[in-house]
Image (cartoon, rainbow, N blue to C red):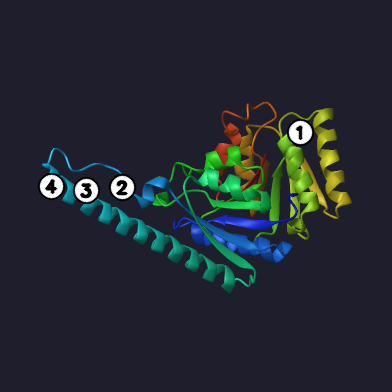
Amino acid sequence: MTEMTGKIIALIDGSVYSESVCHHAAWISKATGAPVELVHVLGRAEGTGNRDLSGSIRLGARTALLQELADLDAQRAKLVGQRGRAILEDARAIVDQDGVTEITTRLRHGDVVEAIAEIEEDARVILIGKRGEDADFAKGHLGSNLERIVRAAHRPVFVASRAFRPIEKVLVAYDGGRSAMKAVDHIARSPLFSGLSVTVVTVGPDTPETRKGLEDARALLKAAGITADTRIVEGRPDDVLGKLVDTEGFDMLVMGAYGHSRIRSLVIGSTTTEMVRSCKVPVVLMR
């Protein structure tokens, strides 16, 4: 299945970012006509408590205690499941109020990356909040699952900012690498970017090769009916991109998840990590 078809997979975890994920999913749905699937994953540790608290109690009392602990585990698993369904129903209400009619929900158990691997074939994009349920306690850190998801996903990953705002101006970071070229191709083929203001920027020295790369990107977008500005800016990518987003009022940043010299199997690009961490606008990452 190509990136331009399929569902919008929105990962909902009950954090302060979940409402923003819902609004962004609705925005994408209304622009593309794609249905939204809201997914909440119950981690393996959430449904059960496996510690043996019985110690060296004599056999009869030990058996009774183990049964009581098993009953508590079952009750906890039931409550966690009920909480997960409540989170999904709240999310559905938000997306529905935003005017989306095709909405499904899915409650999964296990590891979030494994869950995505099983369902992403039918996805056009995966949405996730920048941070999870402990967001307020770890403002300087990315969500523990974000990097794992970006490394494993084969679809674009849309990292939602803390609050939704209308998206009109898009900044595209272009370094000539494979994932950056894929990002430009994605923009050219997606109805999501129709009518938006697009600027493609390369951070680095002004060379004939750099100019040709930008011209190729602009030509590809123009062929798709998107008029894009291009520019070359010297400096450190994370400093330059962050400053452009802040000073020129861009509403979204699109970039490759990896620079062309990165070893993809180890870490996502350092610039990518810094931009996701520091940007106050959504970041769309392409592999």
Which comes sooner in the sequence, label 3 or label 4? Answer: 4
CA gap between label 2 and label 3 equals 12 Å
Secondary structure of the residue carrying numbered label 1: loop
Q: Name the residue that disc number 2 marks.
A: 49
User: Nearer the observer, disc 3 or disc 4?
Assistant: 4
Residue 35 sits above or below residue 62 on the image: below
Circles 3, 4 touching at the beta carbon (< 8 Å): no
Instruction: Measuring from the top left, give residue 240's x and y in whole percent.
Output: 63, 38
Disc nearest the viewer among 4 and 2: 4
How far is disc 1 from disc 3 in space, using C-alphas? 60 Å
| Closer mark to the observer between disc 4 and disc 1 | 4
Mark 2 closeness class: few <14, some 14–19, many ≥20 residues within 10 Å: some
Mark nearer the viewer, 1 or 3? 3
Going 73% across and 43% down the picture, which residue do you hit? Answer: 183
Which amino acid, by three-letter code, is at mark 2?
Gly
Q: Residues within 10 Å of mark 4 (few under 14, many from 20)?
A: few
Circle 4/circle 2 CB separation < 8 Å:
no
Residue under pointer 4: 60
**Quadrant housing residue 30:** bottom right
Q: Is residue 202 visible?
A: no
Give me the C-alpha separation between circle 4 and circle 1. 70 Å
Between marks 2 and 1, how big is the CA–CA gap? Answer: 49 Å
Label 3 – label 4 distance at C-alpha: 10 Å
In the rendered structure, which disc, 2 or 1, sits on the residue that comes first in sequence?
Answer: 2
Given residues 112 and 257, the one toward you in this image is 112
Mark 4–mark 2 Cα distance, whole angstroms, equals 22 Å
The earlier-in-sequence mark between 4 and 2 is 2
Question: According to the image, label 3 marks what residue?
Answer: 66
Say which mark, if any, is on residue 176: 1
| Kind of residue sitting beneath label 1 | Gly
